[in-house]
Image: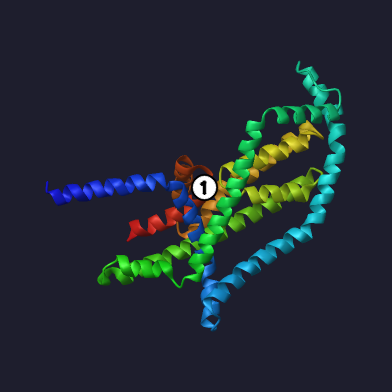
Amino acid sequence: ISWGTIFKLALAGFLVYVVFLIREILVLVLFGLIISVLFDPVIDFLQKRRVPRVVSTLGVYLTLLGLLSYVVFATTPIFVQEIQEFSHRLPEYFENRISPSLEGLGVTAFQDFQSFVDAIAQDATKDTSNILKTLFSIFGGIFSTIFVVSVSIFLSIEDRPIEKTIAVLFPKRYEAFALDLWKRSQRKVSGWFLSRVISSTFVFCATYFTLILFDVHSPISLSLFAGVLNFVPVVGPLLAGVVIALIVALESPLQALFVLLAFILIQQVEENILMPLLSKRFIGLPPSLVLISLAVGAQFWGIMGAVLAIPLAGIFFEFLRD
């Protein structure tokens, strides 16, 4: 074994170690790259119409932010009304249902809802470390979001940064092949996003009609909660189902059981039928590979890994096929 080979192996091991150290940052950069890929077709279209790329990029991002703000502003009164109704009913539920149930299980219950709130406030003031951890996690998520959006904006402003990188890294005879592979990967990322939007919309509509069928209060807020969390695979639907079941159980445990069973059925249809079919249609992945990639991504990187699993599997599938 020559000294040059030993040096190359040591350099490769060092690079793998560096990638391991910055793996969390790389995941955020991948998120930013995926967002920029989603907006690139619109920005390229505006640029062909002689709109400067900086102006078109900022216009697209600001337009999206404006649409999201408008949707939030338009739907806030409905959510506020439903939350107010729930907050008015919560003390009655606590005193008439939760407290007697806890006493029946042998758990010392609070006399009324106000004593329960006071106890929580007293425990929160004592355990300041958990409060600080919660604040750090919230602000950490905010900073991560700002970082991802900033990366995506700068990548979108830069004219074809990935294509330029490919032209530098690949030899001339392989450049056309690498560019074609990147274009196909872009289509897979766009197809992944479209499939997630369709599946989350299906979960929202199915949950809404289910809650209406069982005459559950606050159906819009709960169904929107389920639809938004459905965008995060595995963990999102689980959390949404538990929260919705607990809220419905405040009115009727039997009603909550039927709602939970219906929600499990909706998730089974979405995860095992709808999502694999959409992934095969828009991403070109076999359904079995979609399920395996979700499990592997969640095992390695948790929630972010589950979100990134399908587009990364689509890109990897293109490499393997070629």
Q: Locate residue 84: give its quadrant.
A: top right
Q: Locate residue 134: give its quadrant.
A: top right
User: For this rendering, which residue is in front, 166 or 263?
Assistant: 166
For residue 2, side relative to residue 262 (left or right): left
Expressed as whole percent of the image width and height from the top left, the position of residue 38 reads: 53, 65
Identity of the residue drawn at 51% across and 75% down? 44
Q: Is residue 100 above or below residue 280?
A: above
Q: Residue furthest top?
A: 106
User: For this rendering, which residue is in front, 37 or 131?
Assistant: 131
Expressed as whole percent of the image width and height from the top left, the position of residue 60 reads: 60, 70
Which scheme is used to colour this image of the protein? rainbow
Q: Secondary structure at mark 1?
A: helix
Q: Which residue is mark 1?
A: 304
Expressed as whole percent of the image width and height from the top left, the position of residue 250 reads: 80, 34
Identify which amino acid the numbered label 1 is placed on.
Answer: Met
Label 1 packing within 10 angstroms: few (<14), some (14-19), many (20+): some
User: For this rendering, which residue is in front, 142 or 278?
Assistant: 142
User: For this rendering, which residue is in front, 131 or 235?
Assistant: 131
Q: Can you see residue 264? A: no
Identity of the residue drawn at 77% across and 60% down? 73
Expressed as whole percent of the image width and height from the top left, the position of residue 117 reads: 80, 31
Q: Is residue 163 above or below residue 35?
A: below
